Amino acid sequence: MAHDEVETAFEIAPDTPLPDLTGLPGVARVERQDADRLVATYWDSPRLDLARAGVSLRRRTGGHDAGWHLKVPLGSDDAGRRRAEHRVDGAPTTPPDELVALVRSRVRDAALVPVVELVTTRATTLLLDDQGAVLAELADDVVEARAPRDVGDDRGDAGTRATADAADLPRWREWEVELVTGDDDLLAAAGSALARAGGAPRAESKLQRALGPAIPAPAAREPADGTAAEAVRARVARDVERLLAAETGVRLGDDEAVHDARVAARRLRATLGVFRPVVDRAVTEPVRAELREVARVLGAARDPHVEQAALVERLAAEPVELVLGPVERRVVDDRSAARDAALARAVTLLDSPEHLRLLATLDAWATTLPRGPRADDAAEEVLPRRVARAWRRLERRAEEAEQAAGDARDTARHEVRKAARRARYAATTAALVVGGPARRSASRAHDVQDVLGRQQDTVVRRETLRRLGVQAHLDGENAFTFGRLHALEQSAADAAERAALRAVRRALAPGHRSWTA
C-alpha cells in the first residue's frame, strides 16, 4: 500500500501545553485519542545511504499502522514535509524484498542493518470538520532514541546490538501534523498556531533528528570555490541526485520518473562530454557510453507513453463520424504493450550489477571528480569557452539540416535537436558561474530542442499510425481514421518545421552569446 504523506513538525519543550486548534480553517471540533506506544526499528546501509538521502525504512510495532514502512521524499515546501509512504507486511527479521528493491539505487549492494530504534509515546488529536470527517491528525510525541535491539525481538526492550553510542542518542518531544482530507491552507494555519505556542519548526525527520551528525552530508550542489572542477562537480552532483531520486519511481512505473531519470542521464553525459578538459577523459568516456545506454533504455520506456497520450488526445478532438472502427483501442493496446515491455527492460537494467557499479561511480564523482588538465583553472575562463564549442556544433548541425533533402531532412533535424540539447545543458552548467546570461542562452537552446522535439514526435507517430492502419486493414477494419490522423500529424510536422526555423535563427543570433567569447 502506498500514499503521499504531507506533514509539518515542531520540536517543543517537555512541558509546553497543546494550543486550542478549533479555530483553524474548517475545523469544527477536536477529538483526543488514547495514547499509543510505538517502537520503530530503522534499517539502513552501514554508510547510512538512506538517511543521507532523507529516506527511511523502518519496522514499527504499536498503533494502527504497524508493519514495514518506506518513506521517500517527494520534495520540500514551505509548510512541511512531503513524502511517498509505502507500507507492507513482512517478517520482523528482514526488510521486505519489494521495499528493498525501491531503494536499491541508493544502497546498491550494501547489506541493510538496524541502525537505531525510536520509542515514541504518542497522544493523537483528530481535527474534525462539521460532518465528523478527519481533516488532519496532530501527534504529540515524546521520542526516545535507542541503540537497535536484537532483530526479531518485538518486546520493545533495548538490546545489545548497538551501532551507535547509546549515550549520544537523544530524547525529545515534538508536535507533528499530518493531513488526512484537509488542504495546505489548514496545514499552514496549524503550523502557525503551533509555532505561536512555542514550537520550533523542524524539517528533518525523526530518523535524521536521532542520528544527527552521524549521517554523512549530501554532496554539495554549489561550487566550493571558483575552479572549473568545482563548477562541473556541482552540476554532476545535482544530476546524480536527480537520477537516484527518479529510479524509485521508475521501478514503480511512474512515467514522469522515467522522464526525470532519462534527463538526468543525458545531462550527466553532456556535462562530462562538453567539459572534457576539466575531467579525466580516460575515466569518464566509458561512463558516458554507459549513460548513453541508460538514456536509450529509459527513452524506449517513456516514448510510447507520450505517443499514446498524444494520439488519444488527437483522436478525442475528431468529429465522431470520422472515427471509424476501434481506433483508440488499437492505439492504446499497441502503445501500452510497448511501454510495459520497455519498462520491464529498464527495471532489469537498473537491477544489473553493471548499473549499480555505475551509480556508485557517479555517487563518488558527486563529491570528487576525476580531474583533467584544466580542473584547477578558473571556471569563469574555462566554462564559457567550452560552451562556445557546443554552440558551434549547433551551428554546424543547423547548416547541415538546411542543405539536407528528402528523408535525410528528418535525420538532420534530429541531429540539430541533439546539438541544441547539448548546448542547453552546457549553458546550464555555466550558469553556476556566469548567472543570468548563460540561463538566457540555455532558454534559447531549449526552444530549439522543444520545437524540433515536436517535429520528431510526429515522425514517430506517423510510422505508428501507418503500421496500425495496415494491420486494421488486414483485419478487415476500415483504416480511414488512421490515414486521417496521419495527415494531421504531417500538418503538425510542417508547422513545427516552420517554428523551428524561427527558433534556430533566434538561438544562433550572436548577441546573447557574448558571454562565451
Image: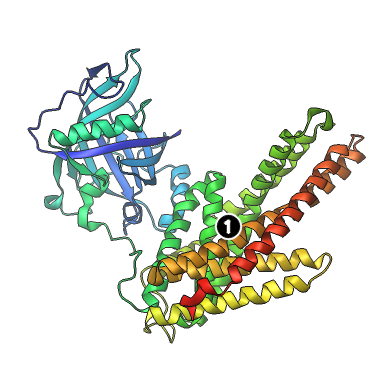
Viewer-closest of 159 and 145: 145
Numbered-mark total? 1
Q: Residue at x 30, y 32 (%)?
A: 187
Q: Position of residue 235 (x, y in %)?
A: 42, 67
Q: Position of residue 209 (x, y in %)?
A: 22, 47
User: Mark 1 = which residue?
Assistant: 349
Quarter of the image where one finds residue 175: top left
Q: Is residue 410 visible?
A: yes
Viewer-closest of 328 and 432: 432
Q: Is residue 25 left or right of residue 499?
A: left
Viewer-closest of 505 and 255: 505
Q: Is 18 situated above or below 346?
A: above
Q: Residue at x 67, y 61 (%)?
A: 500
Q: Is 44 situated above or below 234?
A: above
Q: Residues within 10 Å of mark 1 (few under 14, many from 20)?
A: some
Colour setting: rainbow
Q: Position of residue 428 (x, y in %)?
A: 47, 66
Q: Residue at x 70, y 47 (%)?
A: 338
Q: Is residue 470 left or right of residue 187?
A: right
The amino acid sitting under disc 1 is Leu
Residue lying at the far top of the rendered structure: 131
Q: Is residue 70 left or right of residue 128?
A: right
Q: Is residue 399 left or right of residue 394?
A: right
Q: Is residue 149 visible?
A: no
Q: Position of residue 427 (x, y in %)?
A: 49, 69
Residue lying at the far front of the rendered structure: 511
Residue lying at the far bottom of the rendered structure: 373
- As helix, strand or loop, the secondary structure at mark 1 comes to helix
